[in-house]
Image (spheres, rainbow, N blue to C red):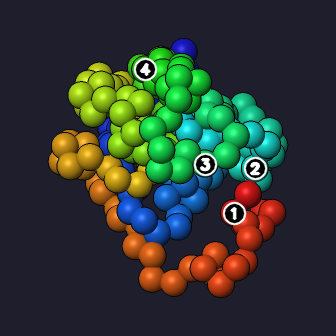
């Protein structure tokens, strides 16, 4: 077990309908890695082919670890099936271990708010995880539709608000920018 580099870990929430929640969390991860903090990002919901952040994590190992646990593609508006639920449960179990403080200084649960909004993880379970995280662990929770009780329990909440987005003009996701 390494010496803790953070004197006090806080809880941050990045939510809202605008682009940039995961990107903001990755910016924080990059800053932390620069100071030799150990970072783990567990991606709920997201799966499929590796994105740029996965390739960067390979270069920044052992300080940055990114674990994809989701399925390929977007959930959409329909109720997720048993495969998606099982993936979310696996991710949550990983998250419980990651926030213990034994291995990581910064833990990012990417799209956990979305997982809660789809009832893949309960708000009560996430609140309990927030209470039980290691004292020296910074915890970041991303995703749309953060539950009010999660935001109330956090130390910092940032809402990303879409004002204009080029996707609406037909620009697809671009390698190195959105994926």
The CA span between labels 2 and 1 is 8 Å
Picture quarter containing residue 170? Answer: bottom right
The CA span between labels 3 and 4 is 25 Å
Residue at 27% over, 33% down: 123
Residue 126: image location, x then y, percent: 32, 30
Q: Which element carries disc 3, helix, strand or loop?
A: loop
Viewer-nearest of discs 3 and 2: 3
N-terminal of the two: label 1 or label 3? 3
The CA span between labels 3 and 2 is 15 Å
Residue at 65% over, 84% down: 169
Picture quarter containing residue 43? Answer: top right
The CA span between labels 1 and 4 is 28 Å
Q: Which image quarter is the C terminus in? A: bottom right
Residue 158: image location, x then y, percent: 35, 62
Residue 130: image location, x then y, percent: 30, 31
Say whether residue 10 is left or right of residue 141: left
The CA span between labels 2 and 4 is 25 Å
CB within 8 Å, label 1 to label 4: no
Q: Is residue 160 above or below residue 80?
A: below
Picture quarter containing residue 144? Answer: bottom left
N-terminal of the two: label 2 or label 4? 2
Residue ID for mark 1 = 178
Residue 104: image location, x then y, percent: 52, 28
CB within 8 Å, label 3 to label 2: no
Residue ID for mark 3 = 74
Q: Which element carries disc 4, helix, strand or loop?
A: helix
């Amino acid at each position: 077990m390494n010496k803790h580099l953070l004197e006090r870990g806080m809880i941050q929430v990045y939510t809202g309908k605008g682009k940039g929640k995961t990107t903001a969390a990755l910016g924080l991860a990059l800053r932390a890695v620069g100071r030799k903090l150990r970072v783990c990002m567990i991606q709920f919901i997201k799966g499929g082919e590796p994105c740029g952040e996965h390739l960067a994590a390979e270069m920044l190992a052992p300080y940055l670890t990114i674990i994809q646990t989701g399925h390929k593609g977007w959930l959409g508006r329909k109720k997720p099936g048993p495969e998606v639920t099982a993936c979310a449960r696996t991710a949550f179990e990983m998250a419980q271990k990651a926030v213990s403080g034994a291995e990581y200084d910064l833990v990012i649960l990417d799209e956990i708010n979305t997982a809660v909004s789809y009832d893949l993880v309960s708000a009560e379970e996430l609140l309990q995880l927030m209470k039980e995280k290691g004292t020296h662990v910074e915890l970041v929770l991303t995703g749309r539709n953060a539950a009010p009780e999660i935001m109330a329990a956090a130390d910092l909440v940032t809402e990303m608000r879409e004002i204009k987005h080029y996707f609406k003009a037909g620009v697809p996701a671009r390698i190195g920018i959105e994926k």
